[in-house]
Amino acid sequence: MAITAADVMKLRKMTSAGMMDCKKALEEAAGDFNKAIDIIREKGKLVAAKRADRETSEGAVKARVSGDKGILVCLGCETDFVSRNSDFQNLAEAIADVAIAQCPADLEALKACKMPDGYTVQEAVEAQTGKTGEKHVLAYYALVEAPFVAQYVHKINGKLGALVGFNKPVPEELAKGVVMQVASMNPVAISAEDCPKDVLDNEYQVAVQKTKEEQVQKAIDAALKKAGINPAHVDSEEHIESNTSKGWLTPEQAAQAREIIKTVGEQKAANLPAQMIENIAKGRVQKFLKEQTLLEQEYQMSDDKISVKDALAAADKDIKILAFRRFSLND
């Protein structure tokens, strides 16, 4: 049968696919619209498979709150040009609507949810890939359930979003401030007690190593200064060679510096006081917790030097944060 322009436009409205893709699909399906739709969707799967290894560093983050539930989703793509396209943004919005309506447990469950047209979220994402020829992926999904949920998405680029769940209703300005705090400051946990053990263990090991390196370097610097050598001139082999060629170091000073760095470094490393290293490292971990746990962070929405915990208590001492989620395409 002959495929008319009206037929092509009808299929385009049904699928949002390109005009030529719609015409080819109708011709292959002999005018059967249902078959043509399936052909277009299969094309999307093929394109998705071919571009599976491509990076998706652009996209759109969307958030929704309904009652005691909040969702955060991200639809990813390869380029900023595609992410700003209205079809892409509309799909991201539609997926967010499906997510808040059905509240699936996780990302895989969201992919299997049905869109209004009867196709799954994953099929809709693959179809969008077929339309643009660019990889699309459902990059992130989170669900927060709490008596009161606040949401935030960065308005300028739409690539950063957050959710915070509270145990009770919170004044609007405070709720907005706390969820923006999560978005901007990227805490690792609500409090020190909630911080994962592997995170704490890693921070402690990093702190121990950094403390040891600093103590060794202090001893080396002191020995270099005593010998009349500027530590900044010999802080790497490259600098030693460069500064010797410039005449800032004599060959004798360069050799002496290398010997000091080697011998003093080895001696100091072998005789570091274990208790001192442990105490300094523990102090660094405490500093990390103050800077990286939400309740202890300095509240960014206040001119006063108060913590998030103090800001909550000032409004209502019974307010508690139960959960938060954050996603950024820029991380």
Image (cartoon, rainbow, N blue to C red):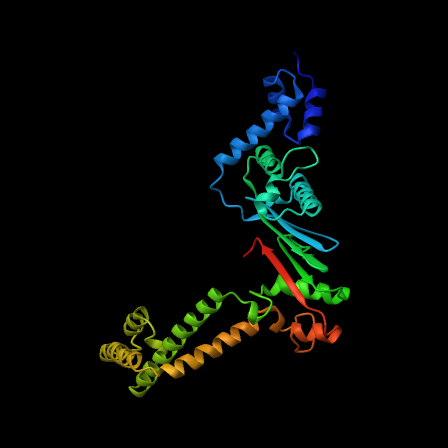
Q: Quadrant of residue 297?
A: bottom right
**Residue 151 in the image: x percent, y percent?**
69, 57
Question: Residue lying farthest top?
Answer: 1
Residue 276 in picture, x, y percent from top left: 40, 83
Classify the position of the C terminus by image quarter. Answer: bottom right
Where is the N terminus found, in terms of image quarters? top right
Residue under the image location 48 percent in, 35 percent down = 50
Q: Residue at x 34, y 79 (%)?
A: 216
Check the image and report above or below for 307 versus 172: below
Residue in view at x 66 percent, y 70 percent: 300
Q: Left or right of 13: which side holds 275?
A: left
Number of marks in the rendered image: 0
* Front-most of residues 55 and 284: 284
Q: Nearer the viewer, residue 44 or 255?
A: 44
Q: Nearer the viewer, residue 33 or 132?
A: 33
What residue do we see at 60% from left, 41% from top?
A: 111
Across and down, in percent, residue 278 comes to 41, 79
In which quarter of the view is residue 26 placed?
Answer: top right
280 with respect to 38 (left or right): left
Q: Is residue 205 left or right of residue 47?
A: left
> Residue 134: horizontal and vertical position, in percent?
55, 38
